[in-house]
Amino acid sequence: MVQGEVQKFLQSFPQLTSEERSSIGRIVPTDRNTVVIFSSCGETVCTFFTSRNFSSVLGYPSKTFIDEGVQFVISRAHPTDLPSVLRFMEASHRPAATWFEDQETGSFQCIYRFKHADGSWRWVTQQLLVLSLTRAGLLDKVLMTFCDCTTQQKKLTEQHLASLAARRRSSKLLDAIVTTQQKLESHDADMVAPAHLLTAREKEVLQLVAKGFSSKQIAYELSISKHTVESHRKNLLQKLKASNVAELIQKARSLY
């Protein structure tokens, strides 16, 4: 499905030579869990193509990516993984060559957790192939893919924890590592569950809470009374199991 869409697009993409089209066509993924994007990041910033499975894989309409650009990823990357995502973006900003010239120095990859529209964290592998450079040697035309690798990553994590657990009896350090990693894994799952219990209005209030808005400011933004905002705050405290406003803000920021 995806490969057929891309092949059709490549035939109508004048920026590539016939040889380059053939090269890309051979490496385009056929997996329905992989989104394919062609963009320009240089002197002209635009998106030429997104595969139709964009929303089914990432949870958002492709227009969100087109409108937000690089912020689409940055604003949805897991806080723990954000530093590696930024390093990935920085490294790809000044490639040594295009993918056609050198496939190793013209391609980049990063695996991180991505906030899906349903509130869950999905592991994705983002790969970037540099198709052309600007006159200044910066990133220009690119082929980008996002592959949902949640199942594979969870298996790797389980195997890793099982391996540590088998040896931790003889090491207090390993015991502490296993315990901490299990807490980190369960934390994200615990946050997703109550998020599904929130009403549409509560989610709107929570998003503004995450930004540090006061009840008065939230009331103004949503055109509701301050009393109604306070009522929503109380419900949010209960549903998210937050003991005070400070904890509610912390949990809100982890969700949004």
Image (tube, rainbow, N blue to C red):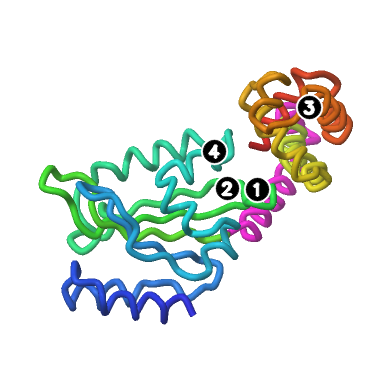
Q: Are marks 1 and 2 in contact (CB under 8 Å)?
A: yes
User: Which of disc 3 and disc 2 is earlier in sequence?
Assistant: 2
User: Which of disc 2 and disc 4 is earlier in sequence?
Assistant: 4
Magenta extent: 149-176
Q: Which residue is mark 2?
A: 114
- Choose mark 4 or mark 1, whichever is in front: 1
Q: CA distance from mark 1 to mark 2?
A: 5 Å
Amino acid type at mark 2: Phe
**Nearest to the observer: residue 219 or residue 162:** 219
What is the secondary structure assignment of the residue under circle 1?
strand
At x 62% / y 54%, what residue is drawn?
153
Q: Are marks 2 and 3 in contact (CB under 8 Å)?
A: no
Q: CA distance from mark 4 to mark 3?
A: 33 Å
User: Which of disc 1 and disc 4 is earlier in sequence?
Assistant: 4
Is residue 88 covered in magenta?
no
Mark 4, Cα crowd under 10 Å, few <14 / some 14-19 / many 20+, is: some
Position of residue 207 measured from the top left corner of the image (x, y, whole percent):
66, 34
Amino acid type at mark 3: Val
**Nearest to the observer: residue 141 or residue 221:** 221
Q: Which residue is mark 1?
A: 121
Q: CA distance from mark 4 to mark 1?
A: 12 Å
Q: Which residue is mark 3?
A: 229
Please tell me how many numbered marks the rendered image carries: 4
Position of residue 134 measured from the top left corner of the image (x, y, whole percent):
15, 49
Q: Are marks 1 and 3 in contact (CB under 8 Å)?
A: no
Q: Mainly helix, strand or loop, the magenta region? A: helix
User: Which of disc 2 and disc 1 is earlier in sequence?
Assistant: 2
Q: Which residue is mark 4?
A: 81
Amino acid type at mark 4: Asp
Q: Is residue 169 above or below residue 4?
A: above
Amino acid type at mark 1: Trp
**Nearest to the observer: residue 178 or residue 211:** 211
